[in-house]
Structures are given as structure tokens and as C-alpha cells.
Image (cartoon, rainbow, N blue to C red):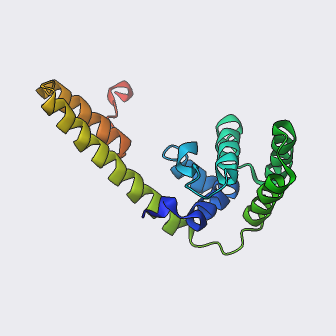
């Protein structure tokens, strides 16, 4: 079982997503709402909060922070959530805002990066195997897929043209 399946770990990620600008700068490109999809027996509260936090960050360039509670109250009202579900959403919102039991942000970031890199490599290898089995794997496709993997892993070389300074 991956730590992305652990509700407690996802709650820690949500806490940083909602409150930490630097965490958002470094990880928002990697994180998606689907990373917070509920597993069997879990509610959708984490997914809803992640969607709000990531959307707010992309729209305003700031963590959702103090706007989380009013946005979740509006969300519950618009969706006409049952009282029990609304209570669970508000409880999770309060826990995230308080930041109870926070851990080192660098540790969470490292786990996210490691997990996403492993997933990208696995997807890359599977894609190459499928293309090879279908007879569609060419040198050009290998280069293109390898470039895409290195871009996703943040390992591309940045080229800087200093010619304009001469």
C-alpha cells in the first residue's frame, strides 16, 4: 500500500496545500485532484478540499488558507450535502486549518516527489513495452518518450542564450 492511499498522509498534504506557499510552489505541478480520490470506505472530503486548494492556488497564486472554511461552507450549500456529510467536511476543514500534528514539510515533499517519480518511470516503461509489442516503437518514439519522462522528472537541461549580451 502506498502512502498516497493513507488518509492521514493525504491529510498532511492537504494541510500544506492549504497553508504553505513554498510547498505549493514546489509540488502543485505534480499534485492533482485525482491523488486525493477516496479509496473504498472513505468519503470524498479530502478530494473536495484538494480541488478547492489547487484551484485557488492556480487562480490567485496564494494558498487558500483562511478562505478554506467559507469556500467549503459554500460548497456544501451549493451541493446540498446531507448534514452528516457536511459535518465531516467541516471537521476535516477545521483539522487542516489548525494543522494539528504537522510534520516537516520537506519530508512530505520528498515523499511526494519520490512517489511521482516512481509512477512516471513505471508509466514510461509500460508505454515502451506496449509500443514494442504493437510494433510501434521507433528510435524517434524512444527519444520523444524519454524526453517527456525527463521533463516530468525535472531533469531537462536548461539552455541559456548569452549571445544577446555581446
Q: Residue at x 24, y 29 (%)?
A: 144
5 left or right of 63? left
**21 or 163: which is nearer to us?**
21
**Is residue 156 in sight in this rendering?**
no
Image coordinates for residue 45, horizontal then vertical, percent = 70, 52
Image coordinates for residue 67, horizontal then vertical, percent = 82, 49
**100 or 127: which is nearer to us?**
127
**Is residue 46 in sight in this rendering?**
yes
Image coordinates for residue 113, horizontal then vertical, percent = 43, 56
150 left or right of 63? left
Q: Residue at x 63, y 62 (%)?
A: 11
Screen quadrant of the C terminus: top left
Q: Which residue is drawn at 57% across and 51% down?
A: 36
Q: Is residue 141 above or below residue 50?
A: above
**155 or 44: which is nearer to us?**
44
Snapshot quadrant of residue 115: bottom left
Amino acid at each position: 500500500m502506498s502512502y498516497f492511499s493513507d488518509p492521514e498522509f493525504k491529510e498532511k498534504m492537504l494541510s500544506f496545500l492549504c497553508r504553505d506557499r513554498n510547498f505549493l510552489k514546489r509540488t502543485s505541478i505534480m499534485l492533482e485532484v485525482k491523488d486525493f480520490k477516496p479509496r473504498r470506505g472513505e468519503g470524498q472530503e479530502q478530494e473536495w478540499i484538494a480541488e478547492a486548494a489547487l484551484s485557488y492556488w492556480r487562480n490567485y497564486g496564494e494558498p487558500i488558507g483562511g478562505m478554506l472554511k467559507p469556500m467549503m461552507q459554500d460548497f456544501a450549500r451549493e451541493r446540498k450535502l446531507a448534514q452528516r456529510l457536511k459535518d465531516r467536511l467541516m471537521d476535516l476543514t477545521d483539522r487542516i486549518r489548525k494543522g494539528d500534528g504537522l510534520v516537516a514539510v520537506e519530508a512530505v515533499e520528498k515523499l511526494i516527489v519520490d512517489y511521482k517519480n516512481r509512477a512516471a518511470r513505471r508509466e514510461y516503461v509500460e508505454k515502451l513495452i506496449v509500443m514494442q509489442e504493437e510494433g510501434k516503437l521507433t528510435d524517434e518514439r524512444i527519444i520523444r518518450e524519454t524526453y517527456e519522462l525527463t521533463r516530468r522528472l525535472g531533469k531537462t537541461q536548461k539552455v541559456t542564450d548569452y549571445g544577446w549580451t555581446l
